[in-house]
Amino acid sequence: MAPMTSSALVSGAIARLKHTRHGAMVYCVHDEFVGRSLDLYGEFSVEETTLFDRLIKPGMTVLDIGANVGVHTLCFARAVGPSGRVIAFEPQAFVHQILCTNLLLNEIINVQALHGGLGREKSSVWIPQIDYSAAGNFGGVSLQGDPGAEPVMIAPLDSLRLDRCDFIKVDVEGMEEDVIAGAAQTINLAVSGLPSGTKLVSTLTTTMQDSIAADKDYQSWMKDLASSGSPCGSDPGQDPNYAAAVNVSGAATTAKNAFVAIWDPMAPRYEQQSYSSTEF
């Protein structure tokens, strides 16, 4: 599928409007990832949106946690159709305004766009000072406990008391574990009616938590490697962070295989995708 490029319809100092593969979209001109991709190629994460189109069915309730300017939100809204519902969360006020603009430009009425974040418990955190007129990864901003430029409320997903939840996408820059912890009841709700639903929740949650832990240990190992000046080909066996990452990654793989073993036999019954252990 060839990239889609077009001239800007409106271009300002920090924001630009173009026709993209995802629809008409405003984006941050100086964003080094999402904005740059939309600007140069007219698309972002097409492989992901193609996969989501296979998984999401009309009538579903979908959560977009960490929605940014709405690339995935627009995809979800079209996939669930008029009978479905999307709830999008974005903590940066400026980016949230762009998200709402993109929903309006595309006449999307089945999305509720909330300004805020999700976590383990209710709290108030801060967005650091961001200069949107300078180059930066605006989708890679982490929330912080220390006072910053912009306060934002965090709440557990379970506090919304949703009566239905079919699909959750989470991209929250290191807070994924907190989001999962605050969504235990919601995740249980989504699969409680399925055979072996409790076991499905347990294995999937373990897979995600162990995968997050492994990523953190691998990052610590790479930082140790960089700070020591050792070449990338050095034997990692002596580094405790690497050993911890390998160990917890193995645990994640075991949980993933257990999930696939339960899920695949029942997936066709619900017209859902089955997976091999390497695809999941």
Image (cartoon, rainbow, N blue to C red):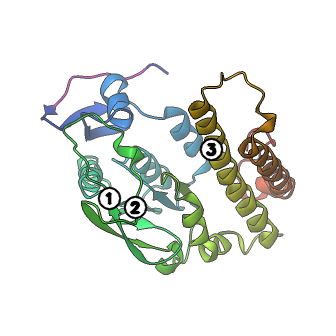
Q: Determine the CA span between mark 1 and mark 3.
A: 24 Å
Q: Could you tell which of marks 2 and 3 lies nearer the N-terminus?
A: 2
Between 14 and 238, the one nearer to me in the picture? 238
Give the residue at x 49% y 55%: 80
- Characterize the magenta stretch by its predominant secondary structure: loop
- The kind of residue tagged 2 is Gln
- Is 10 positioned to the left or the right of 217 in the image? left
Name the residue beneath numbered marker 2.
144
Whether label 2 touches label 1, CB < 8 Å = yes
Is residue 7 shown in magenta? yes
In this view, the residue farthest toward the top is 2
Give the residue at x 28% y 47%: 106
- The kind of residue tagged 3 is Ser
Name the disc covering residue 220, or none: 3
Name the disc covering residue 127, or none: 1
In this rendering, the label closer to the viewer, 1 or 3: 3
In this rendering, the label closer to the viewer, 2 or 3: 3
Residue 73 in percent (x, y) is at 41, 51
Question: Where on the picture, by quarter, is residue 5?
Answer: top left
- Report the quarter where the C terminus lies: top right
Give the residue at x 61% y 70%: 181
Question: Where on the picture, by quarter, is residue 182?
Answer: bottom right
Residue 165 in percent (x, y) is at 57, 68
Q: Determine the CA span between mark 2 and mark 1.
A: 7 Å
